[in-house]
Amino acid sequence: MDITQLPLPSEQSTASHAVELRLAGRFDAHEVDTFRAILGQILDGSGSGAATRVLVSLAEVEFIDSTALAELVRGMKHCRERDGDLILVSPSDPVRVILELTRLDLAFTIE
Amino acid sequence: MADSSVLLLESNHLALRTIGPWLSERLAPLPDEVAAPVRGQIELAVHELANNSIDHAKSSGLELSADIDGDELVVVMTDSGLPFEADQVSPPTEPQVRGYGLMIIEQIATAIDYRRQDDQNRWTLRFSLDSTAFH
């Protein structure tokens, strides 16, 4: 899986506390540790301050499993506990299907 | 039934990536318009079953077989891991960080059978090959 971290345009960002992550390829149990480490750095604020608003772009994700989905839930809960959110952006068909099967499409903010 | 095939997997998450190509081979005798719409969701269900074997049954390895049976694909998974305890599993009622695997399998497969035989877990999943049965 490829993970690209992007700065958000200033008009979408509240101060410096918003980050976009673009995921591509296969997001499965094998990739969860890598994703957790990157998200952890963003949420813990190593470097430029902790982000509370994380946009995760999923348009190019070809496969996702429940372990990876659970990691997104973990991140979403972490952000909401800090009055922020983890937002799913442009989910691909495989992502949309697993969100509907688990009914987590009702729990996440999806743009 | 015909077209039997066996896939042996080591007990690690990376090994699960061979399930997709293996399923594609098993579905190859079918016309593309039949196999293509169903392949992704069948892979997801089999992947989740095998993932549960690794994470929860703590199996040291597992075996998958697949047969086309009329208008269904029948997938059997066996492992020598811990027994499945159905009464300890319930679908999530609010967003949480585990428990979605079986929920996904139950919605994609048309039938699920679990048996504990000779210290082995044996799961049989049946999948419709009619794409209108899928999400």
Image (cartoon, rainbow, N blue to C red):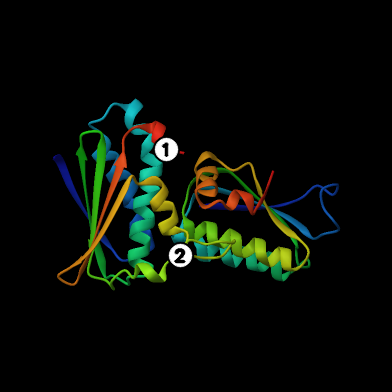
Residue at position x 42%, y 48% in the image: B107
Q: Position of residue B2 (x, y in %)?
A: 13, 39
Residue at position x 30%, y 48% in the image: B111
Residue at position x 34%, y 32% in the image: B130
Residue A26 lies left or right of residue B1; in this view the side is right
Label 2 SS: loop
Q: Residues within 10 Å of mark 1 (few under 14, many from 20)?
A: some
- Residue A46 visible in the shown view: no
| Residue to which mark 1 is pinned | B134
Q: Amino acid at mark 1?
A: Phe
Q: Position of residue A49 (x, y in %)?
A: 78, 67
Above-or-below relation of A50 to A61: below
Above-or-below relation of B77 to B67: below
Q: Position of residue B128 (x, y in %)?
A: 32, 38
Q: Residues within 10 Å of mark 2 (few under 14, many from 20)?
A: few
Q: How many marks?
A: 2
| Residue to which mark 2 is pinned | B90
Label 1 to label 2: alpha-carbon separation: 23 Å
Res. A10 mark:
none
Subunit of mark 2? Answer: B
Subunit of mark 1? Answer: B
Residue A100 lies left or right of residue A88; in this view the side is left
Q: Nearer the viewer, mark 1 or mark 2?
A: 2
Q: Amino acid at mark 2?
A: Ser
Q: Earlier in the sequence, mark 1 or mark 2?
A: 2
Q: Quick one: B57 or B14, which is closer to the camera?
A: B57
Q: Quick one: B81 or B16, which is closer to the camera?
A: B81
